[in-house]
Every structure is written in C-alpha cells, then in structure tokens.
Amino acid sequence: MNRVVITGAGTINPLGADVASTFEAMREGRCGIGTLEIDDVDRLSIQIGGQVKEYHEAEHFNRQQIGLYDRFTQFTLLAAREAITQSGLHFSGALADQSGVSLGTSGGGVNTHD
C-alpha cells in the first residue's frame, strides 16, 4: 500500500477565490448559490446556481493565454498554483515523476466541448 501526502490545496468557487476565503465563507454560513449573471439567462428554466463572480481573467493571464484557456482551465490553473504555493515544494526530478493532482469538477470545460 502506497502512502499519499496532501501537501497543498487550491480552489476558486462561488464562495471564494482561494481556500482561506472559501473556509471563511463556510464558517460564516454564506451561500454560493444566487442569480446567474450570464448571457441569455432568460432562455433557461432555472436561473440560479453557483457561479464565480467578480473574476477578471486579465489579472491572472496574458492575452494569448486568455485566448487559449477557457474559464474552466483558468480556474484549474489558479487552484493548482495555490496548492503548489501552499505545499512549498519545487517539482523537479524524482519528485515531479512521483507527484499527482486530484481534480474535482462538476461539468467543467463544457463550453470548450461544445
């Protein structure tokens, strides 16, 4: 049986842009569900959901990256950066070969698939 060590965590979600703000929102009992702010929301039968709001991609990525990365990919990279920073590790050599990522999503990247 192999041992697994969780060295860092990262997130961006309707409650917060990082792990600390997400835990704070949870402690305060805030809800991440609200009115959806998307184009053509009127065509949907359900107009509420969990949506990351007040996100500005240009604060995190250059113009070329924005053109290449859909919103889901941007969120994935931001969460990974947070987890790596939190870990304090530098991934190279054998450590890079023996490291992995556990990623959870609820239909992320659907815009790209479409």
Image (spheres, rainbow, N blue to C red):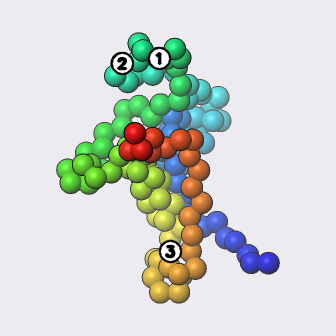
Expressed as whole percent of the image width and height from the top left, the position of residue 95 reads: 53, 82
Task: Give whichever of 85, 2 is nearer the camera.
Answer: 2
Residues under labels 1 and 3: Cα distance? 44 Å
Task: Give whichever of 75, 23 is nearer the camera.
Answer: 75
Question: How many marks on residues?
Answer: 3
> Looking at the rendering, which quadrant does residue 23 occupy?
top right
Task: Give whichever of 9, 97 is nearer the camera.
Answer: 97
Mark 3 neighbour class, 10 Å CA radius: few under 14, some 14 to 19, many 20 or more = few
Mark carried by residue 85: none
Q: For the residues carrying marks 1 and 3, which lies nearer the camera in this image?
A: 1
From this view, report whether residue 89 is shown above or below residue 26: below
Q: Amino acid at mark 3?
A: Leu
Q: Amino acid at mark 1?
A: Leu
| x 47%, y 87%: residue | 93
Closer to the chain start, of discs 1 and 3, is 1
Residues under labels 1 and 2: Cα distance? 8 Å
Give the residue pinned by disc 2. 40
Expressed as whole percent of the image width and height from the top left, the position of residue 111 reads: 40, 39
Mark carried by residue 44: 1
Q: Amino acid at mark 2?
A: Asp
Task: Give whichever of 11, 24 is nearer the camera.
Answer: 11
Q: If the image is split into quadrants, where does the N terminus sit?
A: bottom right
Mark carried by residue 89: 3
Q: Are marks 1 and 2 in contact (CB under 8 Å)?
A: yes
In the rendered structure, the answer to whether residue 28 lies left or right of residue 41 reads: right
Give the structural element (helix, strand or loop) at label 3: loop
